[in-house]
Image (cartoon, rainbow, N blue to C red):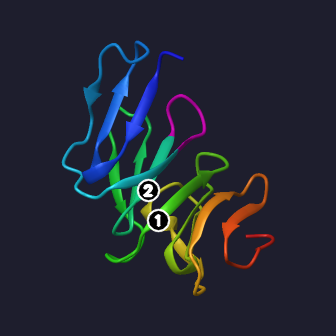
């Protein structure tokens, strides 16, 4: 695997196209820690993290557009897109956000519980955490 994107503390986004020999920084001013990434193909990808941050790329991670999906105190732990318009993001206090058009205008909160949701896979219809299981989201 030659192409790898890594995310992390204080909005770090780095990418290699030669199996890690060289890395390029694509952080572009992000300050919030990022916890998860999901690509549906080689170009379209999303990441999520602290303070309600979601970011989107349409060119394989070379450029990222930040979206404020949640509140400033939200921690979003996992993101899962099933195509280039429909995706879900889950996190603290059982918040589940859904996008219907791949960007900020389509993101809205579906559920709020008292327990965190740490992982999701909506194509497999699974959630991991102490929360309810949803159908037909």
Q: Are marks 2 and 1 in contact (CB under 8 Å)?
A: yes
Quarter containing the N terminus: top right
The disc label shown at residue 104, or none: none
The residue depicted at 76 percent of the width and 74 percent of the height is 134
Left or right of 108: which side holds 131?
Answer: right
**Visible in this render: residue 58?**
yes
Left or right of 72: which side holds 104?
Answer: right
The kind of secondary structure element at disc 2 is strand
Residue annotated with mark 1? 76
Q: CA distance from mark 2 to mark 1?
A: 6 Å
Q: Residue furthest bottom?
A: 114
Secondary structure mostly taken by the magenta-highlighted segment of the chain? loop
Residue 59, x across and y down, in percent: 42, 32
Residue 57, x across and y down, in percent: 41, 41
The kind of secondary structure element at disc 1 is strand
- Examine the structure image and report whether residue 87 is included in the region drawn in magenta: no
The residue depicted at 25 percent of the width and 41 percent of the height is 27
Quarter containing the C terminus: bottom right
Residue annotated with mark 2? 48
Look at the picture and state if 85 lies above or below 105: above
| Viewer-side residue, 112 vs 10 | 10
- Examine the structure image and report whether residue 40 is included in the region drawn in magenta: yes
- Please report the bounds of the magenta region as a residue range: 38-44
Residue 6, x across and y down, in percent: 40, 36
The residue depicted at 62 percent of the width and 59 percent of the height is 119
Categorize mark 2 by other alpha carbons within 10 Å: few (<14), some (14-19), many (20+).
many
Residue 64, x across and y down, in percent: 34, 43
All told, the count of numbered labels is 2
Left or right of 31: which side holds 127?
Answer: right
């Amino acid at each position: 695997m030659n192409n790898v994107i890594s995310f992390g503390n204080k909005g770090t986004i780095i990418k290699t196209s030669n199996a890690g020999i060289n890395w390029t920084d694509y952080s572009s001013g992000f300050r919030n820690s990022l916890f998860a990434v999901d690509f549906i193909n080689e170009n379209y990808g999303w990441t999520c993290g602290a303070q309600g941050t979601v970011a989107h790329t349409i060119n394989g991670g070379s450029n990222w557009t930040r979206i404020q999906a949640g509140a400033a105190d939200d921690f979003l732990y996992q993101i899962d897109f099933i195509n280039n318009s429909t995706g879900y993001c889950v996190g603290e206090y059982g918040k589940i956000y859904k996008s219907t058009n791949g960007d900020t205008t389509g993101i809205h909160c579906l559920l709020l519980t008292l327990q965190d949701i740490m992982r999701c896979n909506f194509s497999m219809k699974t959630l991991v955490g102490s929360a309810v299981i949803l159908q037909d989201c």
